[in-house]
Amino acid sequence: MTGIPLLVACLAAGIFAARMLAQPARLARGISWWVLRIALPALVLSLLPRLTFERSLWFLVAAMWLVFLGGWAVAAIAGARCGWPRARIGAVALTAGLGNTAFTGYPLIGALRGTQALPYAAVADQLGCFIALATGGVLVASWYGSERAHAGALIRRILLFPPFLACIAGFVAGQLGGWPAWFDQVLRILGATLSPLALLAIGLQLHWRIDATRLRAVGIGLGWKLLAAPLLVWMFGIATGARDLPLTVGVLQAAMGPMVSATILAEERGLDAAVGHAMLAAGVLASLVTVPVIDALLGAPR
């Protein structure tokens, strides 16, 4: 679990740097550009060609979409009842619906279930969360963002979103035998910068003091992401006959804290950045406790 202390350290470094730099927001915007347009596509291009597809893995993909759609529904219903502005609804929908299934998911699941569980974690991450981000996430961010877009513009934003293009290229590369070794190494190096830099950018803009209405939104969003979503995925798995590691990994990936890239996307599209940042910081830290507890409750063979 060496990746977890690194994430916490990068977040703390960003918080510290924000108090030392004259214009931390400007630096954060530059870092965010790199995360969404370079690091995330590179990671997708590196990992997707390695995946092997089996019919039995459908549950892992369906589980991640269930979490995403459920998070969107929770945000929309709570927003309507509480009178949230559209930007807050969108921020909660993104951060409650998309989990950090890579940079906290991989190390946590590897530590809790062993290396044999990691291929299943990768399927949930790459074919589930990342594709949900590149399609549904862009749709949510554009729909609730500061610049409302018509249907044609929404489709263009999805099709031209760099991680979405990387998904297509990664699938094609996988069918053709993968990338040359030297190019794959470059992709790995670029992709490895994603989570540390993204958390640094979040730390540069993180404000711990938020008003009561935003705090309520964070509580509702994390209640779904950390507790209700994994429970619903478990019930869905039992009902559909999922079992063993696919069921266990699907539940654990559903329980991960909010996705770093989703938070960056929310800010870029003009959504409620304060809510997104608070969801990410609190959710990642809380998931280090809640995910092992859920793992213990599942009690599946290791």
Image (cartoon, rainbow, N blue to C red):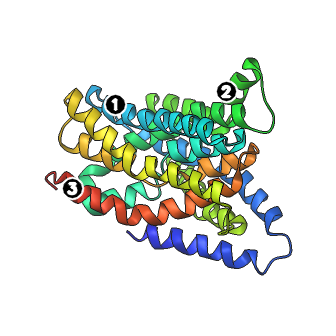
Q: Earlier in the sequence, mark 3 or mark 2?
A: 2
Image quarter hosting the C terminus: bottom left
Q: Nearer the viewer, mark 1 or mark 3?
A: 3
**At 70% across and 31% down in the image, what residue appears?**
143
- Is residue 200 visible to the viewer in this orientation of the structure? yes
Give the number of marks.
Answer: 3
* SS under mark 1: loop
Image quarter hosting the N terminus: bottom left
Separation of marks 1 and 3 at Cα, in angstroms: 29 Å
Separation of marks 3 and 2 at Cα, in angstroms: 40 Å
Image x and y of residue 67, in percent: 43, 38
Give the quadrant of residue 235: top left
Between 198 and 226, the residue placed more toward the observer is 226
* SS under mark 2: helix
Q: Nearer the viewer, mark 2 or mark 1?
A: 2
Q: Earlier in the sequence, mark 2 or mark 1?
A: 1
Q: Which residue is mark 3?
A: 297
Separation of marks 2 and 1 at Cα, in angstroms: 24 Å
Under mark 2, the amino acid is Leu
Specify the label residue 53 is tagged with.
1
User: What crowding class fits label 1: few (fewer than 14 Cα within 10 Å), some (14-19), or many (20 or more)?
Assistant: few
- Is residue 186 visible to the viewer in this orientation of the structure? no
Relative height, residue 275 to residue 129 (above, below): below
Under mark 1, the amino acid is Phe
Q: Earlier in the sequence, mark 1 or mark 3?
A: 1
Q: Which residue is mark 2?
A: 159
